[in-house]
Amino acid sequence: MVKGTHQALHDARNETVKIFINGVFFVREEAKLSVFDSGYLVGDGVWEAFRVHNGKLIFIDQHLDRLWQSAKVIGIKLPFSRDELIANVYNTLEINGMKDHIHVRVMITRGIKKTPSQDPRLTISGPNLVIIAEYKQADGESKDQGISLYTSAIRRGSPDYLDPRLNCHSKLHEVQALIQAIEAGADEALMLDINGFVSTCNATNFFMVKGDEVWTSTGAYCMNGITRGNVIKVCAQNGIVCHQKNFSLFDVYGADEAFVTGTFGGLTPVVKIDGKPIGSGGGCGPVTANLRQLYENLVAQQLQ
């Protein structure tokens, strides 16, 4: 089994889910797009993923804000409204009989190309919209025992050539970082920014705990994670000092606790980085456990 922040319990129902493609539902094995799709050809597209609990789309406004911003940044004019997209998501849940412990991924590409090319002017269709909803419940192994990280040589880029806040289909540098971590025997990758400060992980945002303080990066070189932002929010609401600052591996190796945040896994403890144990080197530390509960309380408010 793959261990990490996306480690999920097996659910056989996913083998028969129906997938939304441009207003039509397809069984899983027949859900296809053309090889001339912009996303396949050049990674030209944006995406968003969020959780569904008790039929509610969790933090949906924040996710859609990020999706619309990403589409605008790369010049994709979305041919539907936010309400229309939400309705399509609910239709996908309904046709699959889904209500709880659901992970939804919304993918939008520029459309079909006339010929393989980067040039957006050669796009001959409107944007393609795909909605995949799956039954996904986090496996307790990673959440309880924690994960290990390895610091990749692949750096997070600066905003002047590919802004890390852009949730685009082009994720090759994160894939490269993860491959390095896996080959080093770790679960996921820790990534530095162009100045050598700790930035983020390949698919999650990184936090460390020093004493009674929580540290995370400045945010200049990492994905503007929804869960990251909500953890910073609950720190402020509960009098927990949370610094968004530059810090290095020197600080990380001496941390009392560390954890990563993501939409699927919530807060996952980190127990080892580059072979060095973090804190006690096992399980969830007290600050992480407290923040996890405060975050889950925030999620619960979404269900009211």
Image: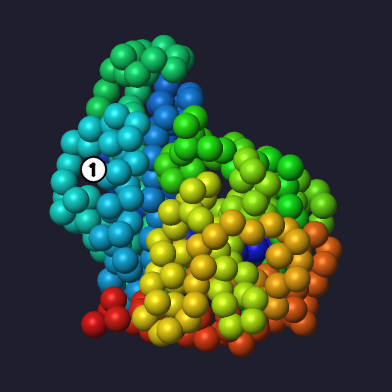
Q: Position of residue 20 (x, y in %)?
A: 32, 47
User: Along the line of sight, which residue is nearer the eye, 227 or 116?
Assistant: 227
Which image quadrant: the C terminus? bottom left
**Where is 217 relative to 272, above or below?**
above
- Work out whether residue 150 or residue 25 is closer to the camera in this orientation and state it: 150
As drawn, is 65 to the left or to the right of 145?
A: left
Q: Is residue 299 above or below residue 217?
A: below
Q: Could you tell me which secondary element the residue under label 1 belongs to?
A: loop
* Residue in the image at 52% along x and 86% along y: 290
Residue linked to disc 1: 23
Residue drawn where x is 70% and y is 72% of the image: 255
- Say which residue appears at 41% left-offset and 64% top-offset: 229
Instruction: Answer above or below: position of 248 versus 106.
Output: below
* Colour convention of the picture: rainbow
Residue 142 place in picture, x, y as percent: 65, 72
The residue carrying pointer 1 sits among few (fewer than 14), some (14 to 19) or many (20 or more) residues within 10 Å by Cα, namely some
Q: Looking at the image, which is closer to me, 223 or 60?
A: 223
What's the residue type where badge 1 is placed? Gly
Query: Residue 298 location in percent, x, y?
Result: 36, 79
Q: How many marks?
A: 1
Q: In the picture provided, is 250 more to the left or to the right than 78? A: right
The quadrant of the picture occupied by the N terminus is: bottom right
Q: Position of residue 292 (x, y in %)?
A: 50, 80
Q: Residue at x 76, y 66 (%)?
A: 253
Using the rendered image of the protein, determine whether residue 126 is visible from the camera's viewpoint.
yes
Q: Is residue 278 left or right of residue 210?
A: right
